[in-house]
């Protein structure tokens, strides 16, 4: 028997309001009434709508009924932090600024906090610090995920000689520039296509309807700030069965970008809803959460996952275009999110693990940890360390703010660094200069217990946005961009 599949149009047809209750009802019915016919399911939902109070005690349908009842006048209860927070491990503490530590201590006092950790590349962000990992009980924190939802690394390893990068620099530079676009508002003149753009969620969730057109135009673009696409040399010292690439040196394409305007709008919209529902003390206001048993929380979860799929699709479009230009299929593709939330088991129960600027590092899980435009990146395999909540750093991490970098680093110093490392920079400002970042080797040394290094990526031809950062981007060290 076919499983139940519903659409928002059908629910609106029986009088359901245009609100998160539609997504919640669809999800619950398709999960718990999957063997019912569509007519049977719509009849149940119609009955709930007519008399929601009659269903409040039902273990499944009561969640829908509660959303259909009139809301109490005073919504948004004050929430106090716990007097003492959960304990959490800090990796590479000597290189972490006080602001990031303070933000993590604040997050540890949330009533929903279960476990946490701070990565060695950590620095201040909005709410949860960048490099912060927080597991919660049935709650998702939009700013615990971050503004750039699903920000992602993607590496394609090609069986081509590294020496081609020096011999054919112009060709490889054009290949990057012809196959993606940079900038906070960057859009492609000719839009790409991908199955993610045909998701029903663009029709079912009101917020997403208005974002679909721009998402289509931005698919395959790369954004601004610390986002990049670069060619370099991949070195694998010995064969690892999980990576599956023989020892040797290869040509690699590495990209770093996220979900663009789609993710930024989702993050800001649902953070606003979370703040309305839960009024936290000022220092914790950006840590407001939504319950996954609440309509808004379920809707954010669906939208967040769509943004993650969209971010992955952006990378895949770029990498497939480049592969066609090179006339080669990659030997291996390695990729991972680092601004996301996952449902994972923890000490016998399911929790929501937020990794804001942190790489998943469960046992045997592959990932990429980049350095800077001149420093190497690392192909890693997670060791599944509980102390880090199965996580690792997402990069070297900033050691100075964008403003400080612009004020203290000269163009001459940047050019000298590029020459010394043999890097051709196609675009990238002083705010992204290597000197603005921590020593990636020190960061990797601080997390030897978290990941095993399987290979390295040495940048050779680097494309970034390069336009001066906006004033609101320069204020803090954060890599988060409130709009894209």
Image (spheres, rainbow, N blue to C red):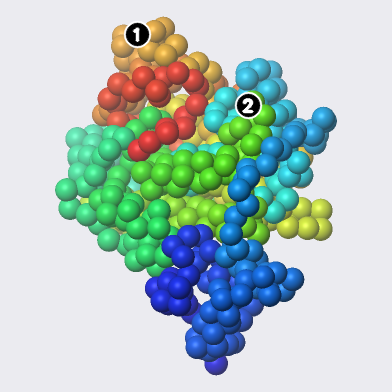
C-alpha distance separating marks 1 and 2? 38 Å
Could you tell me residue 287's position as x and y percent? 62, 36
Determine which quarter of the picture holds residue 410.
Answer: top left
Does the rendering let one see residue 377?
no
In the picture of the structure, the residue carrying the numbered disc 2 is 282
Foreground pick, 393 / 219: 219
Q: Residues within 10 Å of mark 2 (few under 14, many from 20)?
A: few
Viewport quadrant of the N terminus: bottom right
**Residue 287 shown left or right of residue 469 in the figure:** right
Residue 288 lies in quadrant:
top right
x then y, percent, for residue 278 = 64, 41
Identify the mark nearer the N-term, 1 or 2: 2
Quick one: quadrant of the C terminus? Answer: top left
Q: Is residue 135 at all visible to an observer of this figure?
A: yes
Image: 107 above or below 414: below
Local crowd size for mark 1, using a 10 Å CA cut-off: few (<14), some (14–19), many (≥20): few
- Disc on res. 410: 1
Q: Residue furthest left?
A: 189
Q: Position of residue 126 (x, y in %)?
A: 54, 30
Going 40% across and 24% down the picture, which residue do you hit?
A: 473
> 146 or 204, which lies in front?
204
Q: Residue at left 41%, top 50%?
A: 311
- Camera-nearest label, 1 or 2: 2
- Residue found at x 49% / y 79%: 5
């Amino acid at each position: 028997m076919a499983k139940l599949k519903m659409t928002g149009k059908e629910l609106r047809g029986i009088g359901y309001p245009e609100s998160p209750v539609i997504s919640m009802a669809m999800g619950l019915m398709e999960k718990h009434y999957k063997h019912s016919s569509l007519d049977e399911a719509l009849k149940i939902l119609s009955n709930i709508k007519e008399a929601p109070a009659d269903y409040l005690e039902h273990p499944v349908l009561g969640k829908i009924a509660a959303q259909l009842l009139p809301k109490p006048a005073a919504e948004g209860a004050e929430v106090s932090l716990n007097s003492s927070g959960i304990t959490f491990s800090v990796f590479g503490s000597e290189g972490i600024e006080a602001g990031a530590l303070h933000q993590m201590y604040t997050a540890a006092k949330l009533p929903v906090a279960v476990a946490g950790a701070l990565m060695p590349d950590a620095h201040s962000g909005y709410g949860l610090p960048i490099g912060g990992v927080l597991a919660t009980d049935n709650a998702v924190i939009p700013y615990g995920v971050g503004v750039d939802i699903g920000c992602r690394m993607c590496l394609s390893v090609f069986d081509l000689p590294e020496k081609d990068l020096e011999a054919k620099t112009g060709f490889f530079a054009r290949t990057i520039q012809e196959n993606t676009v940079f900038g906070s508002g960057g859009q492609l003149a000719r839009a790409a296509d991908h199955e993610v753009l045909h998701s029903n969620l663009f029709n079912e969730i009101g917020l997403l309807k208005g974002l679909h057109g721009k998402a289509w135009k931005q698919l395959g673009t790369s954004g601004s700030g610390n986002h990049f696409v670069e060619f370099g040399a991949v070195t694998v010292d010995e064969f690892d069965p999980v990576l599956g690439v023989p020892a040797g040196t290869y040509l690699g394409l590495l990209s770093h970008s996220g979900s663009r305007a789609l993710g930024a709008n989702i993050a800001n919209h649902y953070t606003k809803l979370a703040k309305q529902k839960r009024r936290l003390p000022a220092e914790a206001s950006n840590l407001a959460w939504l319950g996954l048993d609440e309509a808004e929380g379920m809707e954010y979860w669906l939208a967040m996952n769509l943004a993650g799929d969209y971010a992955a699709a952006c990378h895949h479009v770029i990498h497939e275009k480049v592969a066609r230009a090179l006339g080669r299929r990659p030997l291996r593709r390695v990729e991972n999110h680092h601004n996301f939330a996952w449902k994972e088991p923890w000490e016998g129960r399911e929790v929501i693990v937020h990794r804001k600027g942190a790489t998943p590092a469960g046992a045997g899980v592959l990932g990429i940890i980049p350095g800077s435009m001149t420093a190497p990146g690392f192909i890693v395999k997670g060791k599944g360390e509980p102390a880090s909540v199965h996580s690792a750093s997402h990069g070297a991490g900033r050691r100075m703010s964008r403003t400080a970098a612009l004020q203290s680093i000269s163009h001459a110093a940047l050019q000298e660094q590029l020459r010394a490392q043999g890097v051709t920079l196609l675009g990238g400002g002083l705010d992204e200069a290597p000197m603005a970042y921590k020593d990636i080797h020190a960061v990797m040394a601080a997390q030897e217990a978290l990941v095993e290094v399987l290979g390295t990526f040495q940048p050779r031809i680097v494309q970034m946005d390069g336009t001066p950062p906006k004033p609101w981007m320069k204020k803090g060290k954060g890599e988060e961009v409130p709009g894209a």
